[in-house]
Image (cartoon, coloured by chain):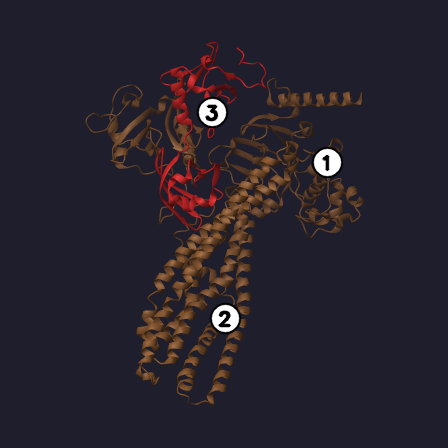
Chain colours: A brown, B red
Amino acid sequence: MSLIDTPPESVSQALTRGASLNGNGLHNDDSQKRNGNGSQETHPEPEIRLSLATDLAQNGEFGERWLLVDDTNVSVVSYSSNGKAHIDLSRPISGLREARTETLVDSGALLLVDKSGDTAEALRYSTGLSGVFAGAARAIKSYIDDEDVPESIGKDMRRKKCPTCGDPLPEDTGVCIRCIDKRAVLLRLLSFAFPYPKQLILMTALMIIGTFLGILPTKVQQILTDSVLVPHKHISWIPWIVFLLILMSGMAVALNVWRGRVAAWLSNHIVYSIRTIAYERLQSLSLGYYDKRQTGSLLARITQDVNELQAFIVDGIQLFVVNTLQIVMIMATLLVSNWQLTLLVLIPVPLTVYLTRRISKVLWNTLHRLYYVRSGLSGAISSVLSGVRVVKAFAQEARETEKFRKRSHTLFEAQVNVEKAWATYFPILGFITTLGTYVIWFYGGREVVHNPLNLPGHGMTLGYLMMFLNFIAMLMSPLSQMTRMADWLSRSTAAAERVFEVIDAEPDVLNASDAVRMPRIEGRVELKNVRFSYDKNQNVLQDVSLTVEPGEMIGLVGHTGAGKSTLINLLSRFYDVQEGAILIDGVDIRQIDVEDLRSQVGVVLQEPFLFPGTIADNIAYARPDSSRLEIMKAAKAANAHDFVMKFADGYDTYVGERGARLSGGERQRLSIARAILHNPRILILDEATASVDTETEKKIQEAIGRLITGRTTFAIAHRLSTLRNASRLVVIERGKVAEVGTHDELMALPEGIFRKLVNMQQEVNKMHQEVSELNVV
Amino acid sequence: MSSMSSNQYDLRVFKPEEVRLFRSSPNDATIRLTVNDERSWYNVRISRAFPFSDPEAYIGLRDGNDAEIGLIEDMKALDPASRALLDIELERRYFTPKVEAVTVADEVHGLVTFRVKTDRGDRTIVIRNLRDSSFQLGPNRLMLVDIDGNRYELPDVRSLGPVAYTVLAKVI
């Protein structure tokens, strides 16, 4: 079971020995209470049902402490770093009434309430462990009530840790940036290019030939120097050699252009494939996935992370391959020509690499600060400008100017720091990279002097000296790029991994492998002991049971946050229940083919969402193949046809962002038309008439009246009068079903919640009426 | 009793001598409050009005339903027993560790790891996306939120040494 952490041996021994102790090194403050009747019994092997470590010690500092629950007792054992365990508290389960948690500032406490009502603090924990101990409190409560611990408790409550380095893994990605296998990620990234083998092979070939042609002229120049210029021989070769040099450079450029064009197509195709696959996956994931992640962070995956990848795939990989080829080819040529000098030239390279890394880090930090300060400044400007009326109304111009001056000065300092760092480090770096050149001049120069006839077998020739100098200059740029490449590679593989995590995510709400096809749902809905919570910490629904016959209209009533909308989310199977079951026509909702279910459940929301497009597109959203006549019939039934026909562009009126402005009532009626056309067997109306005037409400009510005929309907409404037509009303209070019955039955309950709500609304209505009468007078 | 106004929109600020705080019973961890020895509340909770800018002033007293009973303006003037209980309860309720020293600060691709000494003991803090997880409480004073949602106060970033400053300078 997941509520078991493995405690150190001395902690578990503390329980065994605790009751019979004295002289065994363990202390027991209140061992008398352990078995509830004051007698001291030994527990030979108490079966531990729950054991969890908290990170706060008894003195309120960070430390290790254990909550242990066996068959009879709830105990808390302190564990010190020297391996000693100490029972701080022990209570018999039979003497407890309740276990609950208390939320403190940046921590929490597990409280045990005994039968006399006295509350004892068992232990405290840091905020990060709140979910774990909320589960523990529920488990202890189940032990007290002698019930089975619900299976959902303890599942996934602990943050997952990286199995390699032990760092906590971010909840929304589960990717350890330190430990990802860069090669595997890179290979997977490249595998997106495999469907295009021709382009891939062509690009590789162009890279190799292009790089070779790029370094060849330097070799030819050496031949020109040693065979023509210095010995003054073969003067007639000069035009041909120059022609060859131009030809080679021209071909190298042409090949690079070709390679660039092929690469642009191929790399962007990879990015396009990844983006499309990731988006498809996001669409297929359940709402539970979205709840755990902020929309911003998901947006970042699709935009920022894919952009990061784009930069790397389009430029990075090419740069990497070309640089590697260039380095290998140049090094090979140098080593073959004069290996001793080559090794000498390489001496400053490690220093250059080291310094480049250090300097990049410093520059990166100063640049980061600059970006941070700059974005802070523009944020401040935009918020003050948008609140300029308030600033002026309270005559605070001078103070705002002073605040801006301070921020602006910080920006000035940050900017100066960046410029200074730039001005300092780059010349130094430039100097260090040229150190190799001086080595060549020094050693190569001496060899050339000792070879006055400039003969290849008698030491270094002038041509080779020039070739060395040219090649070393050519080598430095790819080398310094490669040192920065390591960082780029890490960043991009991390981005790739985050995107792959989306692509690999498994939806919580899955189509069962043995899913039942239900082409026509009758509409009988049963809820059996349903429990649900979004964060596993606090129950939103508990023990909800209800049976609804086909065609019934159920009005859901209750205060804000009572759990009405959650119930509706479960009926649409946006989430799965954690305990209990929802049956539709006797089949568990989790067994029904998701497509069949969704196509027969229709929703009209409080704030109807219209997509950018025409009115006709929006009505036909669920059935894009609907005929024009069907669309108009649906609109007519929804009391929408008349206002649509008044628009100049009729059903072709463009709505949504930057489209025609529709009133709340008009949007609502379009969304009802959408639901009518969808023709669902089970209909959900979520506050469909919340924000419209009485006249519009009447029109919507009429439309709804036509819509619900013959369908099982669940309706949430704040205006209780709108639920008059409901077959039955269900009052939900703090996640539980509090009252069920017809309007009249519930009104007959003297202390009923529904009755109170209706009375309150009537008083408010009366007040409104009185106010409007006064206005008329 | 001037401070116990009947108007529900008035703040009720108790004079120190009006208030007595004590445990309901030796076995009970909850707090009981009596005002002028006339009215009494069980299961009283406390909350600071200005936990960062003035933690000792204006301590709110709330009943079991989390409705405010009133405020204590100056906890120093309470009777010693009440004051001692309030100290214990504040210490319990307000945990936020204060970072006193940073021994290791390491940043790898947006994941920052600090090994720190706090007034509550040593701890390793792992922060993802420093910019979104840090809040400035004042000049050189920061609040950091780690990957698990735990908060840490850094009363003076400049006193934490160059190792921490290199990483944190970006956000102050």
**Going 80% across and 23% down the picture, which residue do you hit?**
A776
**Going 20% across and 25% down the picture, which residue do you hit?**
A22
SS class of the residue under badge 2? helix
For disc 3, the marked residue is B47
Mark closer to the observer (2, 3)? 3
Q: How far apart are marks 2 and 3 (CA)?
A: 67 Å
Give the x, y percent position of residue A127. Answer: 42, 34
Mark closer to the observer (1, 3)? 3
For disc 1, the marked residue is A700
Q: Distance between the residues labelled 1 and 3?
A: 48 Å
Respond whether the residues carrying marks 1 and 3 are from the same subunit: no
Give the x, y percent position of residue B46. Answer: 46, 23
Number of other residues with Cα within 10 Å of mark 1, as a class: few under 14, some 14 to 19, many 20 or more:
many
Which amino acid, by three-letter code, is at mark 2? Met
Give the x, y percent position of residue A121. Answer: 38, 25
Q: Which chain carries label 1?
A: A
Q: Distance between the residues labelled 2 and 1?
A: 63 Å
Viewer-proximal residue, B64 or A300?
Answer: A300
Viewer-proximal residue, A652 or A339?
Answer: A339
Give the x, y percent position of residue A677. Answer: 70, 45
Which amino acid, by three-letter code, is at mark 3? Ser
